Amino acid sequence: MPVRLNLTRRTVMAGAAALGLLSAVPATAQEDPIKIGLVAALSGQSAKSGEAITRGIMLALDKINGEGGVLGRQLELVSRDDESNPGKGLVAARELVQREGVAALIGGLDTPVSLAIVPFANEAKVPFVGPWAAGTPITKNGAEENYVFRVSAVDEIVDEAITEYLVTKYGAKKPGMILINNPWGESNEKGLLKALEARGMEHAGIEKFESNDVDVVPQLTRLKENGADGLFMVANVAPSAQVVKSLDKMGWDVPIASHWGPAGGRFTELAGVSGEKVHFIQTFLFTDPEHPLFVKLQEMFPEIETLADVTPATGIANAYDSVLLLAAAIEAAGSTEGPAIREAMYGISGVEGVIKTYDTPFTPDNQDALGPNDYLFSQFVDGQIIPLAD
Amino acid sequence: MTLFVTALVTGLGLGAMYGLIALGFQITYSVCSRVNFAQGSMVMLGAVLGYVLTQRAGLPVIVAYPLALVGCALMGMLVELLLVRPFAVRGSEAWLMATVAGGILLDNAVMFTFGNEPRSLPSPLVGQTWQIFGTGVYPQQLLIPLVAVGLAVGLHVLFRRTRQGRALLAVVQNPEAARLMGINTTAMISGSFALSAVLAGVAGLLIAPLFSVHSDMGTLFGIKAFAVAILGGMTSASGVMIAGFIYGLVEALVTTYLGSSYTYIVVFALLIAVLAVRPNGLFGTAALRKV
C-alpha cells in the first residue's frame, strides 16, 4: 500500500523529532498517518483468512486515502501475526496500542484470540472491530463501556440460521453436533442448544474433536447410532475436511449445515468431492467477475485471476466494511481518541459498504453490524464458493 | 457391534502409527540413551517432502518417497550432529531442550518455505472404501499396521542377523568395549538417529493421505508417540509396537463409548496409573546399575 508522503519541512522536522524521541511522539501532527492495527492469523492453518482480511483492509484504505483520508490524514495499516495463538494475539494487540499508537484494532478469524484481546481493548479504551471471529461473547462481553464491534457473523445468530436450514430444507428432527474442541465450539454448542430448545427439538449428541485429529469416525458413529438425521459442523477448514473424510469412510450420506469454517481454505482439495455436500453460511460472495470491488481487487493483487482465487470473499468484504465504518466514525468523532470514536460508532449512517448500506449499524445494546438477513447459504463447486440455489 | 468394529479399525490404524513413530524413540534410546524430541517434526518432514516431490516436482511416487526418506535420514543425522552430540560429549542433558527447539525451528522453517496452508497428498488407496463388518475403511488405513509391523520385524532381523545390527547391539551393551573392538560408535549413534527419522518419515507419508500436509501436523503425533514409547518401556521394540496398538485402541474405545470429551482425561490418567504400577513401562526391564 503506497502511503503518499509530502516532504515538506514540517514533515522532515517531525520525522527527525520522531527518530529522536522514538515512539514517544504523540501522533498529533496533521501529516502523520492514522494507524489501524490488525491482529490476525497471517501464518498457520488459517493463514488464508489473514490474507483475505488484509486484502479487504487494503482495498478500503485505497478508497479512503484516494478520497483524501480521514481528518485530512492518511490511514495506515500495521499488521501483526497472532499465529492463531491467544497469548501471541494479546501481546501483539498491546504492542500495537502502546508502541505503535494505533487508533483502532481489527481482529482475525480465531474466536479464542479475539476473546483474549477483548478485555484489553475495553480497558485500554481502544475500539476493536472484528471482521471474522464469530464467537457470541466477543461483542456480548458484559463490559460497561464496550469497545468491541463486529462486522461479521455471530455464532448465536448463525446457529439459529443453520438450525432453521436443517429443519426446513431437510426436515431434520434429531440432528447431531460435531464441534471443534475450543471456545468457538463451545460458543456454538450453547447457540445450537438454544436454537433446538426454542423448537422443542432433541439432539442426537454433542461430539467434540481436536484440530489435529486424523480420524473422527468414532465420534460420528456415536451420532449415527443415536439416530442423527442431520449434522451441525463447527470447525476450521482442515478439521472440517477430516469430518468429511471420516463420513466418506463410513459411507454415511447425511445433510451437513456448517458454520463458515470450510470457507477458510482449500476445502475441496482437502476433503475431496464430498466437500461439496457441506452447506455453510457466508456474509458475502463474489458471483460476478465484473463486480467493481472484484475488479479493484484484481488491480491491486494481480495474482487473483478468477473468482476461485478469492475463496474467503467473506473476510475481504467484512474487513472492507469494517474499515469504512471505522473511518466514518473517526471522521465524525473528529478525533482518534478511543472514547470519541466509540461514541461516533453509534451515530454512523449512510455508509455504503460492499455487503450493504449501514444506517445505525451499532447501538450500545447491539454491537454487531450484521444480522440473519445478511447471511447466505453456500457450497464449494470446483474449488469455488457459490451461493446455494434454492 | 458397528461401534466396536469402528473403534477397532480406528484404534489399530492410529495405534500402528503411534507405534511406528515410537520405534524411532526406542532405537536411539537403546543405542545411546537419548532421543530426538523433534520426532513429530520428522513425521511432518516426510509428508512435506513427499508432497513437494510428487505434487510440485512431479516425480513418480517410486522415486519421490525414497528421496523423501533420504531427506529424513539426513535430517536425523543433522539433529544428532548439531543438537545432541555437542551436549552429550560434555555430559550435559541440554540435548533434551535442543531437540525440542530444533523441532520448533524445523516446523517454522517449513511454514515459511512450504507455505502456511494445509494441502492434500493424494493416494490411490483412499479413493474408495472397503466395507468390513458394517464399517468402511480406506485401504490406506490397513496399509499402516502392515507396514508398521513389517518394519518392526525387519528391524528385529536387522539387529539380530546382520553384522551392522550386531555392532549396534554391541554399542548398546558397552560403548567403550565396542569402540575398543573397532566398532565406529559415533557412526552407529548417527545411524540410529537417521533410522529413527526414517521411521517417522514413513509414518508421515502413510498418514498424509488420510490427513492434510501442514507444518504442525506432526506435533501431536510426536507427543503421543513419546507416551507410547514410555508405556512400552523404551528398550523393547516389540513392547513399543504393542504399546502403540494398546494406546490407539484405548483412545478409540474411550472416544466411542464414553465420548470424545473424556478421551484425553481417561487415556492419560490410565497412562499415569500404568506407570505408577510399572515404572519401567509395560514391557521394559529395570536398568541394571552395576556398582
Image (cartoon, coloured by chain):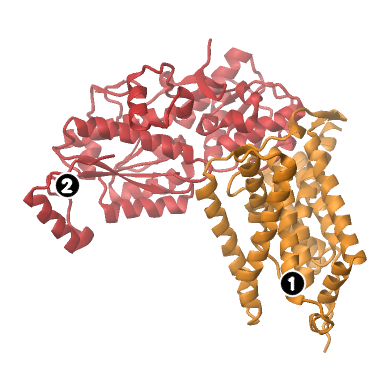
Q: Is residue A94 visible?
A: yes
Q: Residues within 10 Å of mark 2 (few under 14, many from 20)?
A: some
Residue A290 horizontal side relative to residue B76, left or right: left
Q: Which chain is red?
A: A
- Residue closest to the far right: B161
Q: Position of residue A161 (x, y in %)?
A: 51, 21
- Residue closest to the far top: A390
Q: Is residue B223 visible?
A: no
Q: Which dot marks residue A185?
A: none
Determine the CA span between mark 1 and mark 2: 62 Å
Q: Is A89 rendered above or below residue B103? A: above
Q: Residue at left 60%, top 31%?
A: A269
Amino acid type, residue under disc 1 in the picture: Ala
Q: Residues within 10 Å of mark 1 (few under 14, many from 20)?
A: few
Q: Secondary structure at mark 2?
A: loop
Q: Is A292 rendered above or below residue A329? A: above
Q: Name which quarter of the figure residue A31 lies in.
A: top left
Colour in which chain B is drawn: orange
**Which quarter shows the C terminus of chain B?**
bottom right
**Which quarter shows the N terminus of chain B?**
top right
Task: Provide the chain ID for the residue under circle 2.
Answer: A
Q: Position of residue A222 (x, y in %)?
A: 74, 33
Name the residue that disc number 2 marks.
A32
Q: Position of residue A132 (x, y in %)?
A: 43, 34
Residue A77 horizontal side relative to residue B206, left or right: left
Can you tell which of label 1 and label 2 is closer to the viewer? 1
Name the residue that disc number 1 marks.
B187
